[in-house]
Image (cartoon, helix red, strand yellow):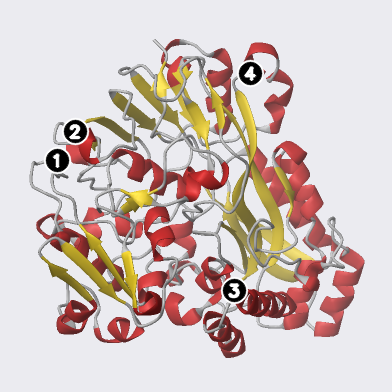
Amino acid sequence: MLGVSACGGGGTTGGTTTGSNAAGGAQKGGTIYWLTKRPAEHMDPQRTYIGRDIFNQQRLVYRGLLQFPAGKSGADAIVPIPDVATDTGKSEDGGKKWTFTIKDGVKWEDGKPTTCEDFKYGFSRNFATDVLTGGPSIYPLNYLPSVAKAYKGPYLKTGQDVYDKAVTCNGNVLTFNFEKPWADFPMAVAGLNFAAPFRQDKDQGDKNNFVIFSNGPYKAQGGKWTKGTGATFVRNDQYDPKTDGNRQANPDKFVFTEGLTNEIITQRLIADGGNDKYAVTDRSIPPAFYNQITGAVEKRATNVPSPYTFYILPNFNKMKDLKVRQALAMSTDRAGYINALGGAKAATLAKSLVAPDLPGYKENPAFASMPPAGDPAAAKKLLQEAGVAMPYPITYTYQGGTPTSDNAAAALKSGWDKAGFSVKLAPLTDTYYDVIQNPANNSFDVTEGGWGADYPSIFTVLPALFDSRINLTGKSNGQDYGNYKNPEAEKIMDEAAAAPNQDAANAKWQELDAFLGKDVAYIPNYIQNFYFLHGSGVGNYNQNPAVSMFPDLGVISVNK
C-alpha cells in the first residue's frame, strides 16, 4: 500500500545510500528496472496524486517551474530549487501574487520550446474537475475560488476571461494572481504536478490519462504507459542538461514492470540474478521473507520511516449514526493489523491522521483511550445503545490482493465481528483510489486511506481530506473518500486558514482534528515504514524526503 500524496518531507529520516559509486561520480549508461505490483492510476501530470508516481515523473519526464534537490537528505532535501523557472519565484501583495520567469532552451521531446503559455494551459486543466478526476486540484480551487466558480477548465471555455486575469503570460513571465495569500506556494509547486506545463495541442482530456509527452531527460517508448504492464523510458535527445543541473540522468534506460506480486519481487531481489541485479522496488518485503534478509542480502535492504499515515474511513453516505461509528472505532484492532503487516519493521501505531513530524502535531484526544487492539465489549455496548439490529452488516473495501494486505484486513474483521458487526471483506486488486473516489462505486460502508502532507503543513492534510467544498463533485469525492460533509468542521478550517500566525493556525488545526475524531470522521491506523530491497548492481541508491522516501531516480545509476 502506498500513500496518495507528493509528501515532500516534514523532517523524516535522511537519505540511505548504498552502492560503490558516490553521488557525482556515478557511471553513465545501463538500465534500471523498477518492479512493482501496484499499477499507476494516472500518468497525466495534473491527475497524478500518488507520491511514487509524482516523483518518478518529475525525475524522468515532467519538468516544472521548481523541483526538489536530488540525492539530498533530511531538511536539505525539501528546499525548492529552480527547474524550468530561472529562480524560485517572486512574491508580492502578501503572498497573493507570484511571478516566475521561464528559461530558454527547455524543449519538449519534439523539439518545440516549453513556454509560459504551456504552464498557463497546464494550470488551467485543474479547473476541469468533471473531465480530469484525481490530482491535487484542491489547491488551485482553494486559492482561486472565484475562478473555480466561473471557470470549468479549458474544454468548456466558459469563464475563460476570469481565468485569463488570474494567470497571465507576458512573454516568458508567468504570473499567478491568487485571491488568498499563499506563502508556501514554491513548496507546493516543487512537491506536486498541478502547475506542470502541458501543450494545448497535445491535450485530449481524459484520453491523456496514460499518454506521456516529455520535456525531461527521458521519454516513453511509444509515448504512453500501458496500465498493468508499465513502460520503458529512453533518453530524450531534446533534453539539455545545461538547463537543469539537478537530475543526473545516469542510466540510458528505465524499465517499469507492473503486476508482479510482492512475493515474486522479493524472491527475485533476494536471488539477485540477471537484470534483477539492477532492479529497485516500491514494495515492502513481506513478513514471510524476513528470515531471509541476512548476510549479503541484508546489506541491500533499507528500513526507513515513510511520510504516510493510514487510516480507516466510515462512509458517511451510509454509516450516519455516531454510535455506530464510535463502535467501529472502539473495536478496530490496529495492533493486529500492524502485526499482520510485519510488526515494527512495517509500521508504527498512529495516534492521529496528522504525522508526528508536522509542525503543530498533537495526538487526537478522541482516540487516546482506544486500546491498540480495540475493545470489542465496549464497542458492542455502543452498538446496543444505537438500537440497530445486530449483527450490523458492513462491507470493508480495501487495497488487497496480497497475503499481507488480506491478513491485515482479516485482523480488522475479527475485531469488528466480535463487537457485533458482520463484516464482508471486499478487496480491490487493481487500482484503488480512482475506484473509491468515484461516487458510482460508493457501495462500501468502510474503506481505508493513506496520506502524507504535500509539504510540511497540516493545511495540506485535514482540509485536503475533509473539506467537502473542494472535494465533492458529481463525478468524484476528491480525497474525501468517506464523503464527509460538515459545515462546523469547514468553519474551523476557514478560521485556521485565516489565522494571523502559524501558532494560531496550529491551534485551530488541533481543534479541527479533535472535532473530526469526536465525529469519527476517521480512525487512525498506522504510520508506514518502507522495508525495501534493491539489486547488487544498483549504484547511488538513495531514499530521501524529496521523493517521499522512495528510490530517487534523479541520482540512481548502474554499477557495470
When asked about the image quadrant of residue 199, the answer is bottom left
What is the C-alpha distance between the residues marked 2 and 4? 34 Å
At label 3, which amino acid type do we have? Gln
Please tell me the numbered disc located at residue 502: 3
Q: Secondary structure under badge 2? A: loop
Residue named by callout 4: 299
At label 1, which amino acid type do we have? Glu
Mark 1 and mark 3 residues within 8 Å of each other at the beta carbon:
no
Q: Is residue 134 visible?
A: yes
Within-10-Å neighbours for mark 2: few <14, some 14–19, many 20+? many
Choose between 248 and 274: the one closer to the eye.
248
What is the C-alpha distance between the residues marked 1 and 2? 6 Å
Left or right side of 355 for 485:
left
| Sequence-first tag of 1 and 2 | 1
What is the C-alpha distance between the residues marked 1 and 4? 39 Å
At label 4, which amino acid type do we have? Lys
Choose between 366 and 325: the one closer to the eye.
366
Residue named by callout 2: 236
